[in-house]
Image: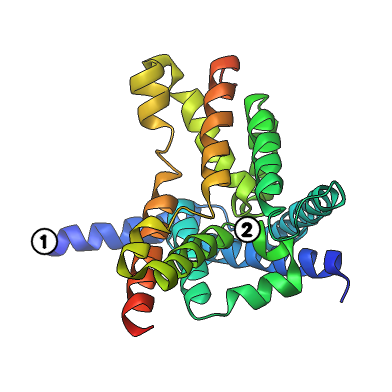
Amino acid sequence: MNIYLAAFLVGGAICVLGQLLIDLTPLTPAHVLTLLVVLGGITSALGWYEPLVEFAGAGATVPITSFGHSLVKGAIAEAESQGLIGALSGVFKLTSAGITSAIIFGFLVALVFKPKG
Amino acid sequence: MGKNNKVKKEYKKLSQQKSPKIPLARNVIVAFVVGGGICILGQLIGELYISLGFDPEKAGDPTVATLIFVASVLTGLGIYDKFAQFAGAGTAVPVTGFANSIVSSAMEFKSEGLVLGVGCKMFSLAGTVIVFGTVTAFFAGIIHALLG
């Protein structure tokens, strides 16, 4: 399948899952995003998320489930090479760019812009 | 107690009657199209970085940083939140929504000061994602190290 089509379908489907959880359950959006991250982490630990990334590219790496996947992937890779301590030292190995850029851009934007409304 | 329960039941009935019905089909379609669209954008940006010489394995880092940068600026301009009201989970679930929650908290609490407002409150929404993601990853790492 074309990678752009796969990205659209898989990414769209993960967002639909989030929308259904928001609309059909009493869960708040914060609960739903938390659930999606944990789901991404668990499917990653089971070895199911990486094939999804290979199939759908950004369709699997852009949704927040990918954050859980990267956290788990980093922890497991480090646990393989370093043992138990890897569960502490590996967690943020792959997510540094995302977390750091969110903090830096968030900080700078908050300095420059005023909230609307 | 019995009377209280009856009142509660009646309130629940009334609030269900009065609260607007959720346009589920519309919400699902919009979330699908917008969320899928943001992923296509991510794919385009990723391939752009690969064509600029990034290792395909490593192109995810600048791609995520770019998406977060764009979402942060759009949040600063007030555009992302308007779009989010229309798109629901379509804008909340992608990593751009993670950036949006951080930037809007930082802006909202700016009036409480750089430290107590921006610094302390920046993760008031996004924190849960990091905490529960980290807990999941920690136990996944432990289990993996123990079971090999």
> Quick one: A95 or B110, which is closer to the camera?
A95
Point out which mark residue B141 bears: none
Counting from the top left corner in percent of width and height, residue B10 is at 32, 60
SS of the residue under disc 2: loop
Mark 1: secondary structure: loop
Q: Position of residue A111 (x, y in %)?
A: 54, 17
> Would residue B135 appear left or right of A47 to someone viewing this image?
left
Left or right? Give the position of A50 relative to A21. Answer: right
Q: Which residue is mark 2?
A: A63
Q: Give the quadrant of residue A78.
A: bottom left
Could you tell me which quadrant the N terminus of chain A lies in?
bottom right
A66 left or right of B143 in image: right
Residue B1 got which mark? 1
Q: Residue at x 63, y 25 (%)?
A: B76
Q: Would you identify the image quadrant in which residue A102 lies?
A: top right
Residue displayed at 67% across by 65% down:
A60
Answer few, some or many: residues within 10 Å of disc 2's Cα (few below 14, many 20 plus, some between 14 and 19).
Answer: many
Image height check: is B125 above or below A43?
Answer: above
| Quarter of the figure with residue B65 | top right
Q: In percent of the image, x 59 and y 30: which residue is there? A: A105
Q: Residue furthest front?
A: A81
Residue A42 can be seen, yes or no: yes
Is residue B24 visible in the rendered image? The answer is no
B83 vs B67, nearest the viewer: B67
Amino acid beneath label 1 = Met
Q: Amino acid at mark 2?
A: Pro
Question: Where is residue A86 shown, x and y percent of the image?
Answer: 37, 63
Query: Which chain does the numbered disc 2 sit on?
Result: A
Q: Nearer the viewer, residue B55 or B75?
A: B55
